[in-house]
Image (tube, grey):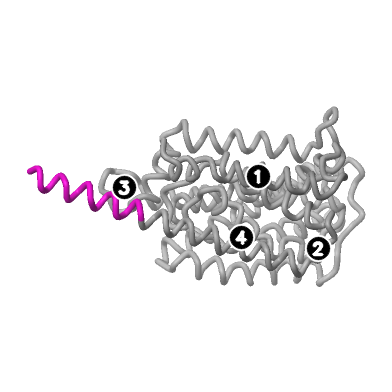
Amino acid sequence: MNLIHFFRRYGIYLVLILLFVSFSLASEAFLSTTNLLNIVRQVSVLGIAAIGVTFVMIAGIPDLSVGSQISLVCILTSWLMVNGGMHPVVAVAGGIASTTLVGLINGYLSIKLKIYPLMVTLATMIIFAGVAKMISGGMAIFGFPQQFSLIGQGYLGPIPIPVLILIALSALGAFILTKTYFGRYVYAIGGNEEAARLSGIHTTKIKLILFSITGFFNGIAGIVLLSRTNSGQPNAGVGLEFDVLTAAVLGGVSILGGEGKISGVITGVLILGVLSNGLTLLNVGDYYQSIIKGIVLIGAIALDSLQHKRRKAKRAEQVQAVRVSV
């Protein structure tokens, strides 16, 4: 294994280790058990949403409505519990069902009406954000039953429940993508949709399911966030879509589709969490953190583009070699 291949395969893990070492030396508080648990608890919402987005991104489908979907499920679930008087379990089920349906709507608009997904989800991002504000009247909703806070604030032993939810969903996502025919279809569609269709894969059906899966994961992420903050905010998920995109691309998911794995995405999520936490401990302002995250995103996309060009050139060389041999 040459050095370039080594860094391509393990570079993201080395970055995470480097950040850990750097912030550990810069701040004595960083490596404390309390702070480390705080990091993984804080990134749980981002991680859950990133798992859902990974499915559509591997299929070559962008989705910018993640943050608005999370805002919507926060407000809708809050309204069902407080104004509708529903039991938390029923309200949670209703909230997750709503974002699953919203994901399906995104899929229908982009696939059935043949509208590019980036534009569809950009439009629905605005629509869902407006619906959340309309339901809440632009105001926060609070006053939830006490047991609801267990989801986002509870512990099972020393481990926060949101972290356990993230671990369980990571395992589920990895299993679906690597151990099932459905997962193989997802990679096939992202690699070459036309070839996948000609091979007998029902690409339209698979993509609709993928949008629904993304909505389902967004719903769970929103419920965890709502339970942790104990207040339904109409802007709860605003801007989260860019963190999700950064984590996914940083974790090796190609923006052009066909590549990526859950373990890499979770590593990308942890990198963002460690980076944000470490900079906060060093008293670096939010504005500077936003600039740094933007630079990280640009760098990750540039690297993905470069790797895609190299893979394309390598495939062209292989095809040319076969032609010459024939």
Q: Local crowd at mark 1 within 10 Å, few (<14), some, or many (≥20)?
A: some
Location of mark 4 (residue): 296
Tell which circle, 3 or 1, labels the residue nearer the N-terminal end.
1
Q: Amino acid at mark 4?
A: Val
Location of mark 3 (residue): 196
Dot 2: what SS?
Answer: loop
Location of mark 2 (residue): 284
Query: Residue at point 55% right, 61% down?
Result: 299
Estimate the x, y position of residue 286 in percent, counting from the top left: 78, 66
Task: State the CA–CA distance, disc 4 to disc 3.
Answer: 33 Å
Estimate the x, y position of residue 165 in percent, counting from the top left: 71, 37
Q: Amino acid at mark 2?
A: Val
The one nearer the camera, 95 or 299, is 299
Task: State the CA–CA distance, disc 3 to disc 1.
Answer: 35 Å
- Position of 250 with respect to 6 (left or right) is right
Dot 1: what SS?
Answer: helix
Tell which circle, 2 or 4, labels the residue nearer the N-terminal end.
2
Location of mark 1 (residue): 16
